[in-house]
Amino acid sequence: MSGSTTLHEYRTGWKRAVIETKVSLTSIGDLMGFIMPTAIAIVVLLFMQRADFEGAPVSLGSMNMPSLIGMNVVFGGIIGMVGALAMDRTNGTLLRAKSMPGGMTGYLVGHLVSTAMFISVTAIALLAVGLPLFDGLEFGTPDRWMVFIAVLAMGIVATLPIGAVLGALLDNPKNMGLVMFPIMGMVAISGIFYPITALPGWLQGIGQVFPMYWMGLGMRHALLPDSMAAVEIGGEWRTLTMFAVLALWAVVSMALAPRLLRRMSRRESGSAVAARRADMQRDW
Amino acid sequence: MGHPPVHDGPTIAVSDLRMRYGDKDVLKGLDLTVQPGGVTALLGPNGAGKTTTIEILEGFRGRSGGDVQVLGVDPAAGGEAWRAKLGVVLQEWRDNGKWKVRDAVTHFADYYRPYADPYGPDELLELVGLAEQAGQRIRTLSGGQRRRLDVALGIIGKPELLFLDEPTTGFDPHARREFHELIHRLTDLDGTTILLTTHDLDEAEKLAERILILAGGRIIADGSPDQLARAASTTAEVKWVQDGALQIHPTDDATDFVRKLLATDDGAVTELEIHRASLEDAYLELVARFEAGDADTAVDTFQEATR
């Protein structure tokens, strides 16, 4: 394949991303999938504003607002990719891509970029809602903007390929729970809705393996007063470690993703799609 | 359409194609050659291996054995340039349902640009009769409209070879007729070879210049609808009652048989009937036996009838 053809496939994928993002942002279903749980979470956090954590300078609600943004990036990246790959295998979108020249590359680029766009838009929307509602958040200076953007970008780069790996492995949308429940568990042990230091040491250790904790930490770093670092493990933001752990997840999953995606693509056929659909109809 | 054929020889050349799932042989040495141009129907009962065959030809499925060349290339090794010369319309596509029709035809045309000069959106939607639906979301289309969009996306790159897998499954008679008209329109465009699968003889007779009947893992009949019909009707069944017993005798020359019968019966033959089998009879019997799980006898009987 010539270089210009590859470039064309990437460019076509980019156009696909623009259409997909437009579709997502104008589909009630897609928007409600984000708005409903997020709105509930924000309302909970508003109530948590009345609570303090061990005399910290900002309320528990304000403390958790940045964590919520971090969680949303991880959720959007992993569930967004897994859900789309599973659905698109059942409705034939993936097979359509396979039936066209360069279609698979275009599909994947399109999906990675549109998911990244959707995550960015929702992160910024959360920021715009969170800043006026929660007292004590700091976002007035360029250094905070830089940290926010860097953490957001790193989170996207780390979670999209994880989502691609899991999505390639998960053959059927009815098995979405296999991905959903562990991620719910991750939320519980990652200090999103309550500081991780309140957990027993061994759970803190497990929590720190996964990107969810580090995304929450990174966003707290970007948005909370520096004195709040005292509440974190070790009493500091651990900026370098955060980027290093996220980068490690990115590298490992990026190394695995292409091979698994190729395997997924190779197995795709009309009868595979039909069998998956029949399987779903039998169960539902 | 757009591509000048770059390979000499047949569009599809298959010899001794074999496919095995577990310990079940689905294709047992299928031979098939399709020359450029025209519509060929691959007809057979459900479960005969039509979809398996077409998926192997499309490069979507590996095979257990045999040689396959599609546009001069082995589909298992077909690259993107080869893929650009094919159009694929599957049984039930529900992809990209939230997209608008025009966005889909505009976007998917892009993939073909390095290889061909694809259809513009207006021209294409006009051709398949969806001009009025251009602004609708895809999932709001009716079943027939949706399939016409699938055809539009199948021919968008002006393919040399178009695959249609059971294209009218689930259609009402009106949608079916409209779809058949669309296929006739496509065959008027120069040079696209069409291979369609169907389990419906009537559809194959209406659309195809050549019908290949697939059953028992092989092609068991091959010819124009006319040739197959004549082959099926050469055998006639003569029935009569003699001495109170019903007699049935198959024969290739009913006239001669009856002349001899009546010359020697001394008036004992009554209720004489000559029943000439149609292609439809032969095919329906094949399907009935096939569905009863008696594939080998079904094939034998059919081949005897259409020899």
Image (cartoon, coloured by chain):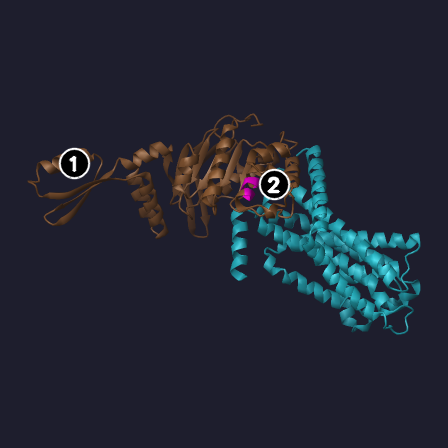
Chain colours: A cyan, B brown
Going by the image, does B262 lie left or right of A22?
left
Q: Residue A33's spot in the image, x, y percent?
A: 70, 58
Q: Residue A168's spot in the image, x, y percent?
A: 63, 52
Q: Name the residue located 52 percent from the left edge and 33 percent from the top edge.
A: B161
Q: Is residue A85 above or below residue B39?
A: below
Q: Is residue A98 above or below residue A233?
A: above
Q: Residue B112's spot in the image, x, y percent?
A: 63, 34
Identify the residue at the far left of this view: B266
Point out the stretch of residues depicted in magenta. B145-149
> Looking at the image, which is closer to me, A235 or B301?
B301
Residue that label 2 marks: B133
Q: How many numbered markers are drawn?
A: 2
> Looking at the image, which is closer to me, B157 or B151?
B151
For the residues tagged 2 and 1, is the chain the same? Answer: yes
- Residue A192 can be seen, yes or no: no
Local SS, label 1: helix
Q: Earlier in the sequence, mark 2 or mark 1?
A: 2
Write down the quadrant of residue A86 in the picture. Answer: bottom right
Task: Assign the magenta stretch its main secondary structure.
Answer: helix
Residue that label 1 marks: B257
Q: Name the residue located 93 percent from the left edge and 65 percent from the top edge.
A: A227
Q: Is residue A134 above or below residue A260?
A: below
Local SS, label 2: helix
Q: Name the residue located 36 percent from the left edge and 47 percent from the top edge.
A: B287
**In the image, which is nearer the foreground, mark 2 or mark 1?**
2
Residue B147 on the magenta span: yes
Q: Amino acid at mark 2?
A: Gln
- Residue A91 can be seen, yes or no: yes
